[in-house]
Amino acid sequence: PSAAAAAVPSSAAGVESCSTAPLYNFTQLATVCLDILIQMAEFFPSRDTNECVVRPMPKIKRALTDPALLYQIVQLLLTYDPSIVQRVATLLYMVMQDNVFLPRLYLSGVFYFILMYNGSNVLPIARFLHYTHLKQAFRSAVPRLDSQCQSVLAPLLPEAATFYLEQYGPEKYAEVFLGEWDDPEIIWNTEMRRHLIERIALHVSDFTGRLTSNVKAIYTYCPISLIDYPELDNELFCHVYYLRHLCNTTRFPNWEIRDPVPFLRACLAAWHEEIEKKPPAMSVEQAAAVLGLKTGDESWREPSTIRRAYFKLAGKYHPDKNKDGREMFEQINAAYELLSSGAGAGGAPDPKRIALCLRAQSIIYSRHSEELSAYKYAGYGQLIKTIDMEAKDTNLFQQTKKSNPNSTKAGSTKDEIGGGELLSAAIELANHTLMSSALNAEQLRRDQGLEALMVAFDRCVPMVTANSSQDEMAVQVCEHVCNCFGTAAAFEGCRARLAEMPTLFGNLCRLLQFPQLTRLGAAAASCICSLAVCTLLQTQLFQAGVLWQLIPHLFHYDYTLDEGGVSHSEGTNKQTLANKLARSSCEALASLAGFREATPDNDGVQNSLKALLTPYVCKCMRTMNNDVVLKMLNSNTENPYLIWDNATRAELLEFVERHRTNNGHTSELFGAEFRLSVHAKELIVGELFVRIYNEQPAFTLEEPKQTCVDLLDYIDKYAEELTGRRKNSGQKNGVNGTNGGGGDLLIDIDWKAATACGSSIATEERVRMTMQALATLIENNNGVEMLLIGHFNMLVSYLRARLYPKLQFSALTVLSMASSNRECVHDLATVRTCSAIFALMYENENAVAPSLRALTALAANGQIVKEMLEYGGLLYILRVIIQRPTDASAALRLSAAELLAKLQADKLTGPRWQRFLIKFLPDIFADAFRDNALTALSMYDSTTSNPELIWDDKSRTAVKSSIDKAISTLAERQKMDDDAKWDMSLIGGEDWCAYGDSASGELVVAGVFIRLFIANPGWTVRHPTQFATELTERILASMRAKPNTAAAGDLNTLTTAFVELVRHHANTADRLPAQGYLPQFCSAMSSPSAATSRAAILMLHQLAENNSCADSLCRLPCIDGIKKCMESQPTLMHEAAHALKLLMKRNGGDLAAQMLTTGMIDFLLLVLGGRVDGANSPAAKACITEALKSACMDLEKGAEISALLEKSTVWAQYKDQRHDLFLPAARTAAIAAGSTGVAGYLTEGTFNPPPISNVPPPL
């Protein structure tokens, strides 16, 4: 504002002093005036701070809007002065904002004048054009401008330029307007700007000529004809792109496409317009007649002549001057624009422009496929016509002058497009539309598009040869057609239509013959994958020989390419393309066979592939990815499922190549009869190479259960031949027997016309190998043994195949493995297994170990435990145990001993086992086997003499002789009759035992030799309670026996053993009170028999030291018996007195009363007074003294007893002193350690001293 204010007085001063020297020239004065106007316009904006339009319009803008002033300002642009032009553009931009005169601004000629400016300060001009060019009430009468008629710049600038101005804004447009640009969105350069200026200058030349003579002349608007730019000849501008540049993917590989849907719609419209191209509605002659031009000579075509005729008529019929002249005025405008633009030179559709439209659509679909997937393609009618016409063109493959889609120069409109490029572009577009939305295939089918594609396919396939390259038109057409058919195959209607095209399948096979055309081959293989969803199409392809074409590609795969860690791409590495083709071929084969989820099973293809590629590879094709399968096929492999190496590959490829190159049908089975020569030497059961599996037992099988079924079927097939067992058709439980036929059909995998693989191997060896494989299978796969249920009868029959020892051993191994399963053991209990195992143990030493393992496992079943005993299992087991101890036999003997222990532990049959066992071995061995088998064996092998066992070489020899004799007889009987059972009565009677001589002359109670026990009383017997009970019973029986009998003669020995037992094992007497034996001992003390009473008092003397027994005796009438024993056995006075002392110390029961009633006190005083013969033991007197003192302490009778004793003079000699020193000293052991209390058998000491009492004497 300050600069503008300062400019005003300066201007005034300049006027006042103009007579001297002017301050401004005209240019400077004009710029000052324009600056003032600009400042005034700035002071009065068209909108307020809230961006609301100000009304009424500011006066300054309203005044400048007057045409008389506005036109004068606009015409300042013709000065071409940079400062003036820049200010005029700025002023017009400000004045026209929200101006009601804006739609009529173009009448001032401002757009002509402003574009004639050739300076570089065009940013204000760009702002002005950006704001105003779409707001003019301007319409073009030229049809080709209908789409551009909204912009007043349409006749002046290329359509791309007006879009660029609107899309990118004035700043970016100003940059483009001054520069050199050549890309899909804008083509503009200095030459085009110069051409624009020349054309506009020519158009306004009449006015500029007048303006120089009259500066106040006002421009009368005259529409300019469309300016054609030579640089844009043959350029097709669609939507916002020049299609030739957009399709030039070499220069512009990834040019961003905005608004793909409108762009696609525009391409379709341009395509349709090109196809339906027609001459203009008004011909050139009619236009000349409208303008009143005479066409007699060529002068009427001059632009000046046309322009003068237009001005003359336009002024006459302008609606402002002639109300009825509007219609004529419009015709005059249309005729003028038609003649001045040359739009009347119409022509036929241009194939090149059509091809550009097609390629542009392909680019849109390729880059925006997902976005366009929701739209149905609207151009199939035109597209199919184009494909059909081009495919039927007889000159399709003529190499005419072609238009390179990547050319950087626009050619002539008369250039022809040849070599099938239009066909290639059309089919490529069809492919892209289907890839974007598969549903388009249905519309394509309804419009007969599949038939048109097939015609093109039939034309191009024969043109593909071994010398063809990937860039050839025929190759590209075939590739796109394959992709189209592959997409269409997803629909049932399309598949039905394709099935009616017989040449399709042969064509696909032919395209797979050229390994150098990897992309084409991959497309054909992918098409085959899609077609394979239909059984009919599968069969047609199969019968066309597609397998012969696909299989060779599998062996062009190189798995090291991906594993090598080197980056690669299809564009730079041929092996990458070969790998892609191999993957596609593998997928096609899998689909044809029905190995994919959406494809039906095809038995014919599967049989052929199993024969050609092996069943295992076919299974991998179903379950694994293609890379794994291809790596397997191109590697050397030997595993239980596959033998594959260079030789097998060469053999297969030679067979395939012979059929692939033979035009005749040499194989009606299409390869299903093929067999690899290496398989003839192998035993194959199911899908398993048995030899290799036996060599690789750790190999993990994929379907162990099915393999187990196959192995069992094979073993059962030869059971009758090798064992004589007649087959039972109802034996198999849920297992499908597939090898029911005769001969050596070993490969049970549905291979047709199979040869006798492995027939050079003997039958028994094949079965043995199969059993070995079965055992390995069971060992390494838990739960598989369940499948043996129902087959054990057959397997057991092999145990009896004595002519084939190896078979027996293998069958035993299988049974041993199966016996770890409870259900299997339960089933084995029904088939009489044990007798066969026992016979094998007896006849084959090598079978002993697995037999014992099997029997140990079977021993878990009670029925089998019983069966073992019935069939003489005890003899067979003992035969192993009694072997001479060696390193080789140690493990076997231990296993047999453990088995025997397990059999004895059976709840039902175990006691019977023990009862029969002690017929051959002493009782202690039965317990020893249960407690510790290793210790039992050591005890068996050693020479022993202890209270529980007398064992030496003589005993072992006797036992071994008895067992050998018995088992020999039994084995011979069972060899003749499998059902022969063991009869113990044939060996001996009820009292017979094999070791009887070793125990002759010995007194044995509960398995304890009494003589040796008395000699070694510290021995810990195995069953002390049982021994104590039976020993007590024997003593009581001896007491009741008649004198001078053997039983009565053993009383003294038995009593000594009892006393030593209780003395050294005090706990053994704890249960005697509860068993009711103490009252009988008390009665025995009163027995008139000296031997009986003596035994009774000795036992009482020892029992009194046991707390339980002492408590019980206190409640029994035992004092009278003790008194009688003292009287009758004075030599045992000390023992009786000691027992009395112990009893009286407990002060329990009515012992004190018994002392009074039985006269015991008086008798004891007599003993103390020395008046009883033979009873002068000081120790006895000391015990009696203690007993009497204890009696005096009784709560009930103590006072009475004390009073009675006080009357005795003898008692006075004893009552005041202790007599412990008269008692015998306790025996002391060299080592003061008691018994361990453990039945250690061989480790038990030979002597233990009596226990030492740690209780101090009473005070």
Image: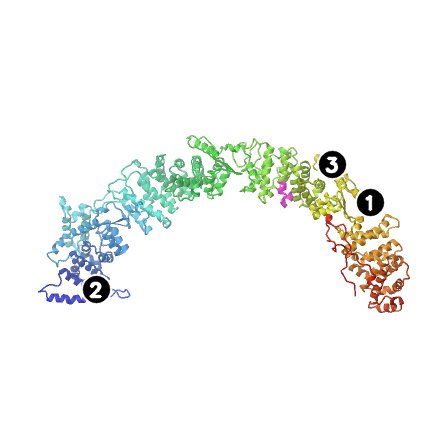
| Chief secondary structure of the magenta portion | helix
Which numbered disc, 3 or 1, marks the residue that appears first in the sequence?
3
> Alpha-carbon distance for marks 2 and 1?
150 Å
Q: Quadrant of the C terminus?
A: bottom right
In the displayed structure image, the side of residue 1257 where residue 644 appears, left or right: left
The N terminus: image quadrant: bottom left
Q: Residue 969 carries which label?
A: 3
Residue type, label 3: Thr
Q: Which amino acid does label 1 sit on?
A: Gly
**Does residue 111 appear in this view?**
yes
Q: Residue 368 location, x and y as percent?
A: 35, 49
Query: In the image, what residue type sits under mark 2?
Result: Ala
**Vertical placement of 316 versus 298: above or below?**
below
| Colour scheme of the picture | rainbow
Secondary structure category for the residue under label 1: loop
Look at the picture and state if 237 lies above or below 459.
below
Segment tinted magenta in the rendering? 814-830
* Position of residue 1210 measured from the top left corner of the image (x, y, whole percent): 89, 66
Position of residue 1163 in the picture relative to residue 290 (left or right): right
Disc number placed over residue 1001 in the picture, else none: 1
Asked if residue 531 shows in the view, the reply is no
The reply to whether the magenta stretch includes residue 828 is yes
The CA distance from mark 3 to mark 1 is 32 Å
Compared to residue 912, the image places residue 1114 above or below, namely: below
Residue depth check, mark 2 versus mark 1: number of the one nearer the observer: 1
**Image quarter of residue 525:** top left
Residue at the disc numbered 2: 41
* Of labels 3 and 1, the one closer to you: 1
> Dot 2 lies on which element?
helix
